[in-house]
Amino acid sequence: MKKPKIDKTPARLDFIQSATGLILALFIMGHLLFEASILISNEMMYKVTLMFEGYYFFGERYPGIISFLAAAISAIFILHAAVAMRKMPSKYREYRIMRKHTASLHHEDSSLWMIQVLTGFAMFFLGSVHLYGMMAQPDQIGPFLSSVRVVDGHMAPLYLLLLFSVVSHAFIGMYRLALKWGFMEGKNSKKSRKIHKFLMRGFILVYLVIGSFSLAKYIEIGMTHDFSDGETYHSQTIQMESEQ
Amino acid sequence: MSEKKDGHQLRKLQVDILRFDPHDPDDFPHIETFEIEEAHGMTLFVLLNEIREHHDNSLKFDFVCRAGICGSCSMLVNGKPTLACRTLTKKLDQHITLAPLPLFELIGDLSINTGTWMRGLNERLETWIHDKEQELNVDALEERMEPDLADEIYELDRCIECGCCVAGCGTIQMRPDFVGAVGLNKIARYHLDPRDKRDNKDYYELVGDENGVFGCMTLLGCEDVCPKDLPLQSKIAYLRRMMLRTGLKG
Ligand code: HEM
Ligand code: SF4
Ligand code: SF4
Ligand code: FES
């Protein structure tokens, strides 16, 4: 007997949601570390910037590469948001039911999900502003230029909110991903869940600390550095042809 | 009140019960408080009977087996769905709140009708062995099964349809058409069973959508409240992988 064709869409959407979430989370893990290069030195952050502009591969700087990366991440970001939106409470009534439920159940994992929904919603705005900035002004990145944007461009409060949103959202998301698909579940799922949760907490803590310190450093540079020489950083070791 | 045995100090319990009779047009949901002397080894079953015998004989609640087997006594104890007959008062604070499980039809006070809901679920998911040939031949010997597999199936068959996982699931509160962990567990159980001849596509038809396994948001309320400790998280993940593979292959 010939069976009617099954509707593959729900399976695909769930897969896309998880895959885009995972890519974004891995991206964020790298991104925040690269940003933290400022904690080592201005020179280090400058070198990381040069690397992403392709300087070490082509011998010249192409900020367009950063635009391209930002556009690619934006595309994944939009796709993820579009697909994950299905899961958000779509009416106030649903939101209220869920709030009441999590409040009366005192259940940590349900509350974690609420955090994901709220931070996800916040990132619609916070993430979009940041991503657009990077696409539009890819040549305005560097130890001094970034600090100027953070302080004089008034991005500091937005970055702080974005940092807390993205870090909690990403690692709660990874925790949920592992349980959802049974990743490294092992024989005893209660035990592996504890380990996953421990890792989630650890990563959230470590990344919040790293992120906050980096942001504080950019703020410090933006407030204290004397920019009378211009806002572009001049390396002692790497001489650009255009600067000679 | 100050008598001690097994190191537990007996207390005067304050029990708040959410009461409502939906069949009485003049009634409205309200909290009624009872003060009960705790006894040794007291369960909520004993406590509720104490209330009915000595305080208010109109209080409605259900018990059958008193041993965690029938699933009739599920209720919200301090907000958490669980079996009242297996809950010892000494594990709870002196102040206890009891309420009926949400989502199910309310008969009155703590008494709910899970039966209609569960029957609907079983019909919708066709939770019985599907096997055309065997249906005709009742005299044939049953196929043999590996003991490990039989154990695994039995483990999932321990579900008593108490509805705790339904009450503990935020997803199903928001979206009542979701099948819930009890339904997904049943599908996982028949999927394991070699006597059931349904293939992955048949199961996909049943749970391969937003009301089925892809609707589950992994909040794990179900896993954390199931009084029979069924491996719900693990079985839902298994079903999700299976259904994803089926869905991507087509
Ligand atoms: C506008 C931005 C975003 C929105 C609206 C959003 C929304 C959501 C929602 C509602 C969920 C829960 C889905 C569910 O419970 O099934 C989710 C899951 C997830 N999100 Fe986001 N998110 C956004 C951005 C991000 C970013 C930037 C990252 C990574 C850094 C990320 C990583 C994840 C991960 C890993 C999951 C788990 C995926 C899954 O359960 O399949 N999200 N997102
Ligand atoms: S899965 Fe557990 S909580 Fe759910 S109905 Fe069965 S026994 Fe009750
Ligand atoms: S994991 Fe969460 S969403 Fe899925 S069935 Fe259990 S409680 Fe419901
Ligand atoms: S009375 Fe049967 S499970 Fe509690």
Image (tube, rainbow, N blue to C red):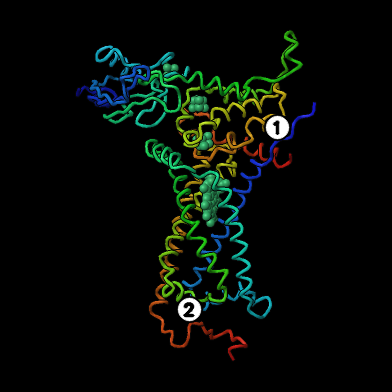
Q: Is residue B115 visible?
A: yes
Q: Which residue lies furthest to the bottom in this view?
A: A244
Same chain check for tags 1 and 2? no
Nearest to the observer: residue B5 or residue A157: A157
Secondary structure type for disc 1: helix
Q: In which quarter of the image is residue B234?
A: top right
Q: Which residue is drawn at 48% across and 29% down?
A: B166
Residue B209 drawn at (x, y percent):
62, 36
> Residue A101 got which mark?
none
Using the image, determine if residue A50 lies above or below residue B173. Answer: below
The three-letter amino acid code for the residue at tag 1 is: Asn
Residue B143 drawn at (x, y percent):
73, 17
Q: Residue furthest top?
A: B139
Residue B108 drawn at (x, y percent):
37, 19
Nearest to the observer: residue B68 or residue B221: B221
In which quadrant will I find the C terminus of chain A?
A: bottom right
Residue at numbered disc 2: A144
Using the image, determine if residue A243 lies above or below residue B125. Answer: below
Residue at numbered disc 1: B200
Pointer 2 chain: A
Q: Residue at x 55, y 73 (%)?
A: A137
The three-letter amino acid code for the residue at tag 2 is: Phe
